[in-house]
């Protein structure tokens, strides 16, 4: 088991190996399909992004509404392949960590290697578990997208597995 604090020095990504069990503490950003399209468009238009993407980690999820007294509702991973058209551009602009579920396309794997990034797998169907690891949640951008808005989620002991390491080794 490896404990990671985010955001962190990108040199630590190089030590991670496919199959490593990791527990994350710190800040991750939640974004999925619609938000990725908007981020991609901003990059192509040379406009600023709504959060600092450098060395950031993005979790592909769409949270359910929260219950009173909780920072977020159930927040399980969504299928990562839907973000494949946008991921290389985000990685080229400084994104270092990605959390989702399922395999990635060849272009994404090549971009992970090129940028020294890591793709972490989260467990599908474990949204309540992931929500229980949330310390706080803040809406960052695109509130009109509802569950597809961008959120900053602070987590403690958030369990993931290194699915694709910075050298391109994969559990798939």
Image (spheres, rainbow, N blue to C red):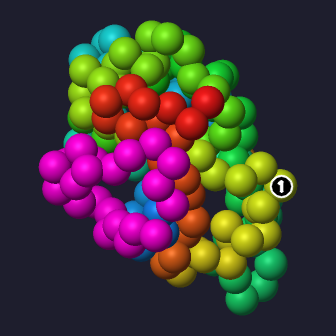
Residue 156, relative to residue 64: is it above or below? below
Between 72 and 22, the one nearer to me in the picture: 22
Image quadrant in which the C terminus is located: top right
Residue sitting at the far bottom: 69
Q: Does the magenta segment cover residue 100? A: no
Q: Is residue 97 at all visible to an observer of this figure?
A: no
Would you say 102 lies left or right of 84 here?
A: right
The correct choice, above or below, for 54 with respect to 134 in the image is above
Question: With 91 as the anchor, is 37 left or right in this view?
Answer: right
The structure residue drawn at horizontal position 43% and vertical position 20%, both measured from the top left corner, is: 109
The picture places residue 132, in percent across and down from the top left corner, at 68, 78
Picture coordinates of residue 135 (x, y %)?
A: 53, 80
Identified at 58% across, 75% down, the residue is 134
* Residue at the image position 47 percent from the left and 63 percent from the top: 22
Residue 83 % position (x, y):
58, 24
Task: Find disc 1 in the rendering and name its residue.
Answer: 125
Above or below, 72 relative to 34: below
Which residue is drawn at the image coordinates 67% and 67% (left, top)? 130
Tell me the magenta residue range: 1-21
Report helix, strand or loop for mark 1: loop
- Quarter-of-image position of residue 24: bottom left
Q: Nearer the viewer, residue 149 or 170?
A: 170
Please tell me in which quadrant of the rendered image residue 5 appears: bottom left
Name the spot of residue 70 as percent of width and height, x first. Answer: 70, 82
């Amino acid at each position: 088991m490896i404990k990671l604090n985010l955001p962190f020095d990108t040199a630590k990504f190089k030590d991670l190996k496919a199959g490593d069990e990791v527990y994350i503490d710190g800040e991750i950003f939640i974004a999925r399909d619609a938000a990725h399209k908007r981020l991609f468009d901003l990059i192509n238009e040379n406009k600023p992004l709504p959060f600092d993407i450098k060395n950031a980690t993005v979790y592909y999820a769409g949270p359910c509404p929260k219950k009173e007294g909780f920072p977020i509702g159930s927040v399980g991973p969504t299928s990562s392949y839907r973000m494949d058209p946008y991921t290389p551009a985000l990685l080229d602009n400084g994104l270092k960590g990605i959390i989702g579920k399922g395999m990635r396309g060849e272009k994404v794997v090549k971009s992970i290697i090129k940028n020294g990034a890591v793709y972490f797998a989260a467990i599908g169907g474990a949204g309540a578990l992931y929500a229980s690891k949330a310390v706080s949640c803040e809406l960052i951008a695109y509130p009109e997208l509802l569950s597809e808005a961008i959120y900053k989620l602070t987590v403690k002991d958030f369990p993931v597995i290194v699915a694709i390491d910075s050298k391109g080794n994969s559990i798939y």
